[in-house]
Amino acid sequence: MNDTPSYGFDTLQIHAGARPDPATGARQVPIYQTTAYVFRDAEHAAALFNLQEVGYIYSRLTNPTVAALQERIATLEGGVGAVCCSSGHAAQIMALFPLMQPGNNVVVSTRLYGGSITQFSQTIKRFGWSAKFVDFDDAAAVEAAVDDDTRAIFCETIANPGGVITDLDAISAVANKVGLPLIVDNTTATPYLCRPIEHGATLVVHSMTKYLTGNGTVTGGVVVDSGNFDWTASGKFPSMSDPEPAYHGLKFAETFGPLAFTFHGIAIGLRDLGMTLNPQAAHYTLMGIETLSLRMDRHIANTKQIASWLEGHENVAGVTYAGLDSSPYKELESRICPKGAGALFTVALRGGYDACVKFVDSLELFSHVANLGDTRSLVIHSASTTHRQLTTEQQVAAGASPEVVRISIGIEDADDLMRDLDRALKIAHG
Ligand SMILES: *Cc1c(COP(=O)(O)O)cnc(C)c1O
């Protein structure tokens, strides 16, 4: 299905990457639950190990079920290739790994998923990497933060938890100017609402755990490669441009051209870091993606209705949803996410921290969980959970202040959801 860009999104989300199984004719993509693959002969084995022939060696690197998913997501995002990983967080490390050396830094948005803030501010230091946090509403500040050791710029399309839209056109213009790759976490938008590569992104990462699988069953991630970045131009990416000692001196950029990052991700990233997606998970995600556009349309219709109703509620101090006319990000919605601003927002309660805790405890239909992008409606008080490790200052900058609750609207009946919210708001302020 690679040569059929004329098909629409709804067709591609079902057919891209999938073809009747060559061995059995099975119409749905089989779960290839196997660790290894028999080589035709010794020569075939050697060619595979030399990356002279593309094929299956061992499922830490490649697996046919996972490959079908990689092709589907690459197609939907408009990339040349993709590497699936065991989680969204794994995908973020896998995206940075080929680019970074000890001493290098990445310029990242202050508005990120709480776990990403911790991963970037703390954990990557163990690799000798660091992150510089900047307000991405200010493209000049992003540019000013870039120094000689910067190797990438990282942000989210629709930033979790506040539902704030990033001006990807402005940020990619900065990335182009300074000659660095832009990595965009497109988890909360999905390729149905936004294709960051069309706005200049070099790599797109996802937590497939969320909308792509869509029903809270799988932990998975993916890195999509635009194929658009010249890894040799600046001399800043030796693992891509120079002989790579971890693969007997192979020059990835020279050998694989636009697919250099994808091959590096599999041949070195998955091989040596081992953050591999299992075929069963890939199967669930393939099935989830078949209905992505239908779910997103419903998620958005529900969210628009509920966010504007909440905005007028007497116990609510404010709602951050870029789809509201009151949002300062409304203009960006029409340019970056014209089909809608997703289904994630925060609501600030007049009763502050205590009311938030009581509100979360009083909801019945909404589940109080550390997840988003499920068919079910979900809620979490970020300040006491996902953003708990952060300072109050970081919480505020991330859009997760103590008086706000994050809401992920599902695809249930909007009236039922509003009844549940209204009842819990009254209890919380009672
Ligand atoms: C959940 C999430 C992640 C992390 O993904 P996991 O699959 O939980 O590892 C990263 N970014 C965003 C925006 C997320 O929502």
Image (cartoon, helix red, strand yellow):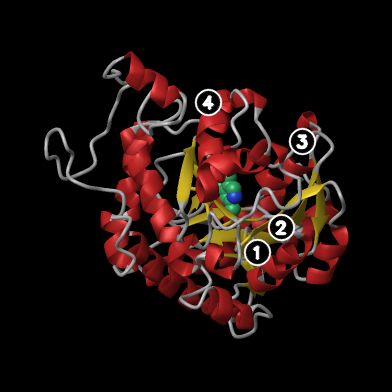
Q: Position of residue 352 (x, y in %)?
A: 74, 62
- Residue tagged by mark 3? 101
**What amino acid type is highlighted by mark number 1?**
Gly
Q: Are marks 3 and 4 in contact (CB under 8 Å)?
A: no
Q: Is residue 400 visible?
A: yes
| Among the two numbered marks 2 and 3 on one chain, the one whose residue lies closer to the N terminus | 3
Q: Secondary structure at mark 3?
A: loop
Classify the position of the N terminus by image quarter.
bottom left
Q: Nearer the viewer, mark 1 or mark 3?
A: 3
Q: Say which amino acid is labelled 4.
A: Arg
Q: Is residue 72 above or below residue 137?
A: above
Q: Which residue is the extreme one toward the bottom?
A: 325
Asked whether mark 1 lies closer than 8 Å to ligand 1, one says no
- Give the residue displayed 54% in from the left and 63% down from the top: 197
Inter-mark Cα distance, 1 to 4: 36 Å
Q: Position of residue 335 (x, y in %)?
A: 57, 79
In this rendering, which labeled residue sits more in front, label 1 or label 4? Answer: 4
Q: Establish whether ligand 1 lies closer than 8 Å to the Cβ of label 4.
A: no
| Mark positioned earlier in the residue sequence (2 or 4) | 4
Distance from the alpha carbon under mark 2 to that under mark 3: 32 Å
Q: Residues within 10 Å of mark 3 (few under 14, many from 20)?
A: some
Q: Between tags 2 and 4, which lies in front?
A: 4
Per the model, the C-alpha gap separating discs 2 and 4 is 37 Å
Report helix, strand or loop for mark 1. Answer: loop
Q: Nearer the viewer, residue 100 or 244?
A: 244
